[in-house]
Each structure stands twice: as C-alpha cells, then as structure tokens.
Image (spheres, rainbow, N blue to C red):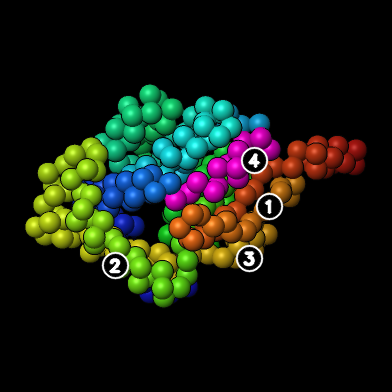
Amino acid sequence: MNKWLFEFEDKTWLPATIREGMTDYLRFILNSGNFYEPVSPLVVQLLQETNSLKVIDLCSGGGGTIVQVQKNIQHKYALAVPFMLTDIFPNIPAYEFIEHKTDGQVSYCSTPVNAVKVAPALKGVRTIFSAFHHFDTPTATQVIQDAVSAREGIGIFDGGNKSIFFIVAMVLFHPIAFFLFTPFFRPFKWSRLLFTYVIPVIPLLTVWDGIVSVTRLYQPHQLLQMASDVNNENYCWQAGKVKNKYGMHITYLLGYPDEKKFVAAAASANSTA
C-alpha cells in the first residue's frame, strides 16, 4: 500500500498553521459540495441499530464534512443528532467556529483523541470520514478493535476513486479552488493568505497529501478482512461503495453489536458455568 509514501498532515513536526490551513480547506470543499450526501442513510442505520443518540467523529481534522452530514440527517430524517468532533491534533479555532455556526449541534473535544484508544467517556456511534486511509493495516485494525471492545457502532467512510483520472482531476482542481476560495474560508486567518498566495505551502502539501490518499484507499473487501481479524464476536458488518453526484465513490464499513447474538452467547456461557 505504498508504505514509503507519507502525508504531511500526519507529521507531528508540521506547524499547526499549515495543518489547520489544509484541513480548513478540506472542510470548505467537502461541505460546499456535499460530497458525502449518499452516506446519510448509512449513518442513520448505525444510529438505529445501536439505539445511539450521539455521534463521536474521530480524526475530524478541521471538521471535515460533519456540518453537512448533520444537516442532511436533520433535513431528510427529522433527526437532530448531535455530533462531537475529535482529533489527535484538534483544530480548536475551526471547532469553535463550527460549534457556534451549528448552535451546539456539532460540539468538540478540546483534548487530543487517539482513534486507537478512545476514552470510555466518549460514548456514541463512532465515525471516521476521509481519514481511514491514513492508517496502515495493523493500526486500522486496532481502530476497529477499540470500537468493538467498547461495544460501540462504527462507520468508516472514505471518498475517492483509485484511478489516474481522479488524481489528474485533483491536481488540476485543488490549485484553482485554493486560488478562488481561500479568502472565504472561516475562521479567517491572515496566515492562511500568506501560505497560500505568497508562499504556497498549504496548496502544495494539500495536493501531495491528496495524491497519497488516493493510493492508500482501502477497498470494501480489505475493510471486511480487518473486521474479521478483530475479536468481533456478536458483531454485524457491512461494507460496500456508494457514488455521489460527482461520480466519486465512497467506500464504507459499518459495524455494530448484534445484541440478540450477544444475549444468546451470555446465556449459553451462564448455563455452562
């Protein structure tokens, strides 16, 4: 899986100003285009299967597509589901802006959250949007295992087409989008203008990370293999792809406890004790 490649966003030495500029851009593009609109029913399915009332979004970056996902669910299903943004490098200015913009429907955790070991206090369905490809297979499997160990539902959603055409389209689109839309990103930062127009570090690193991301995208059968590799008795798994209005595929994995099997297994264990 091209292990020698790396994404700048993952590096601890990357200045927060640059990382936040990159994730702010992604949030603007993903929400403006409503790229993840087709996954709304899948998130609702997770909530229904787990009887959960809250979504804990892991690896949120600058907020990603969560604002639009929350809106889609509220408008289409009349469900005012609260979301919480978390990340190992939390983008606090962006999260504060989002919390205010959504009247608290999208809140955030101000302390770093590692997707491999989520604090027990963070209860709710777990989602990961546009980030699962950042993990190598062993780490990705640990992320799934942590959700299973906590008996929480998990939804993994990663958009992109693993093709040369998609990479070329990205290389052409991102620089133009940066040039046109950067002044409209919120919260506004002068540093973002500096590192976009004068010293174009943010666009260059974003394009690089985008190319690497495409090469690392997991396929449904790979996600199911990871799920089968964890200690996941009494869990239901579902994987596949959906396509958005732009023709971009979104690969997904859903996992949630099968309570009927869990109760039956517990009863069987008690009867043999």
Distance, label 1 to label 4, CA atoms, is 12 Å
Q: Secondary structure at mark 1?
A: strand
Where is mark 3, residue-wise?
Answer: 221
Where is mark 4, residue-wise?
Answer: 45
Viewer-closest of 110 and 101: 101
Residue 201 highlighted magenta (yes or no): no
Residue at the image position 57 percent from the left and 38 percent from the top: 125
The answer to whether residue 26 shows anywhere in this view is: yes
Closer to the chain start, of discs 2 and 3, is: 2
Q: Give, as a single range, the part of the protein colored magenta.
A: 35-49
Residue 99 image position (x, y, % from top left): 35, 29
Closer to the chain start, of discs 4 and 3, is: 4
Three-letter code, disc 2: Leu
Horizontal side, residue 246 vs residue 146: left or right: left
Three-letter code, disc 1: Trp
Closer to the chain start, of discs 2 and 1, is: 2
Pair 4/3: label in front: 4
Image quadrant in which you'd find residue 204: bottom left
